[in-house]
Image: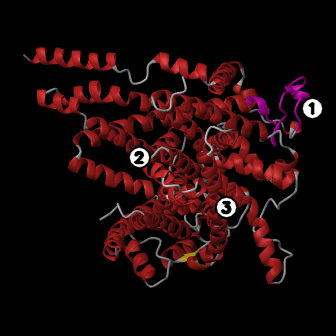
Amino acid sequence: MWKTIFRRLLLMIPQIIILSILIFIIAEFMPGDPFTGMIDPNVDPAQIDALREQFGLNDPLPVKYVRWVGNALQGDFGRSFNYKTDVLNVIGDRLGNTVRLSLLSTVLTYLIALPLGIFSGRYNDTLFDKGVIIYNFVSFAVPTFVLALLMVFVFGYNLGWFPSRGSIDVQASGFWEESWSRLYHLILPSITTAILGTTSIIQFLRTEIIDAKTSDYVKTARSKGVPIDKVYTRHIFRNASLPIASGFGYTIVNLLTGSIFIERIFNYSGMGNLFIESILSRDYSVIFVLVLFYGILGLIGTLLSDLILMTVDPRIRID
Amino acid sequence: MASNQNTEADIMADDMSASTPPMGFKVIVKEFAKDKLALGSLILMVAILLFIFIGSFIIDQDAATRVSLFDAYLPPFSSSTDPAYQGTEYLLGTDSAGRDIFGQLVIGARNSLLIGLSVTVITSVLGIIVGILAAYYAGMVDNVIMRVIDFIMILPQTMIIIIFVTIVSNYNVFSFILIMSAFYWVGQARFIRGRALTVGRLDFISASKTMGTPTYKIILREMMPNISSLIIVNLTLNFAANIGLETGLSFLGFGLPSNVPSLGTLVSAATNPDILENKSWVWLPASTLILVLVLCINYVGRALQRSADAKQRLG
């Protein structure tokens, strides 16, 4: 087990290096630089050139890359030109919000998906099952931004149940009030994200349970006199949950990366929103670290999923 | 001798498709007859498509994108207050620049559909070629291709597409289609490879190989027919997904250039809270159209999927 983890971690290093080189090259091609905005008749062009020189923007690409990696290994990921502070500080400020959003979304995803999947599989072809199938179909097909907008429009503005924008109330003071305000702002975006994330979990659970009903181990358990409820909780659910457990890593990554649309629409100040802001203000250093962060997250998610699958299903050995 | 072999292979391929049709037309008709919702979706989808394409020919594109500041934010069913355009009726109202929402909706929908279609066709062709080659040659070739695909899959694709959109100089509709296709073909290739691998292991393929049937013939006449139904299903489902992706990117402001109407651009007006709350006629029709289109196409795709799989068929 530990050997596998170690080997997989080692394999990640070249992947991360390729990823960082790719993003670095792409970032170089972006038009303009952080000083383009300063160009106006009152500023001497020579002064801007001096600034460019000072920040090393005129150096050749490999030199810049090596310098960046050298600094990054010492924990210095460069400075954001837009926020005039360390990139890590800028991202750190937003990280908390995004993590809170993803955590609540993950919890809600499983809270919605598990009961729906289990009951629609157990009582398949009933009215409830048909309803779940329709729900599942819609949640699979609807584009993220359309659902999010409709949610804001209906629950945020028309019904006024939840705040529709932002991540915290400006007037909130004190620990409890702030925490409550944060949670209150989180509910609508999390539910939206959760609805979109339930599709595959429900699908897997339902088909697995329906298949399991006619399998030998269930028949054996029934003929030995195990009560039907116990067969479902002890025997079927355990087997049916395997693909879901293994999808956990992907689920988390999907939630984090899917947050660009959600954060944009709910004007939630997390990392997805930060990415769009940085693109608009050409804040390379932030863009670069964000994409790298999400890329590494994707690698970790895949690893996590494989590891979970290995632990819960002893039949599978991944080298 | 060579021609003899070819005719043999031809007969074999013909036999194959004659005895076990992967997804006959009759099966599809039966499936739609059984599932009334699918039939309804199909009719609605065709109706919307016809309406949009015929409508976009009739509607004057210049009139639809004409700016008249007097007419900003007119509610639906109002006529122009601008003396220059007296008598112009705005069926669905106007946006911030006084442009006709209805005209933009029709032309935007046509653009979104065409882009969705182009991306689907490009990604599918690339995906089918790469996927089948990987499955046919297997071994080393497969390994290398899959490593590359896996690597592209874990990239934060939306982010990288947005970066590309901002760095491409003289950015236009075609570069947008190419950028989207460059990232979304990998999913296709992966899917096709998975299916082609199982077909490639079947006995009749090995038999063909032993008999010396040329590679292109095995791929085109023996492997392709066996996954063709899956390809059709996949095309439909991806078409819907790609419409969602294009409108989504345009919504964020990184899709179609701002002078080309798109459903996503219309919806993006809703990022302004005032428009979202009080001027819903600007963005609600476009959102509804996207939703209805995507749901219909997906539902038709699901019905096709069921007809392709004997286990799931209703009819």
In screen coordinates, is B196 left or right of B91? left
Tell me where residue A96 sits by quadrant: bottom right
- Alpha-carbon neighbours of circle 2 within 10 Å: few (<14), some, or many (≥20)? many
Mark 1 and mark 2: Cα distance apart in space: 51 Å
The answer to whether A73 is drawn above or below residue B8 in the figure is below
Residue B154, image x and y in percent?
Answer: 44, 58
- The answer for which chain carries disc 1 is B
Name the disc covering residue A108, or none.
Answer: 3
* Residue type highlighted by circle 1: Thr
The residue identified by callout 1 is: B81
Do callouts 1 and 2 point to residues on the same chain? yes
Mark 2 and mark 3: Cα distance apart in space: 30 Å
- The answer for which chain carries disc 3 is A
- Per the rendered image, the range of residues in magenta is B74-103
Give the secondary structure at mark 3.
Answer: helix
Residue A45, image x and y in percent?
Answer: 57, 69
Name the disc covering residue B186, or none.
Answer: 2
Tell me where residue A74 sits by quadrant: bottom left
Tell me where residue B135 sits by quadrant: top left
In screen coordinates, is A237 left or right of B139? right
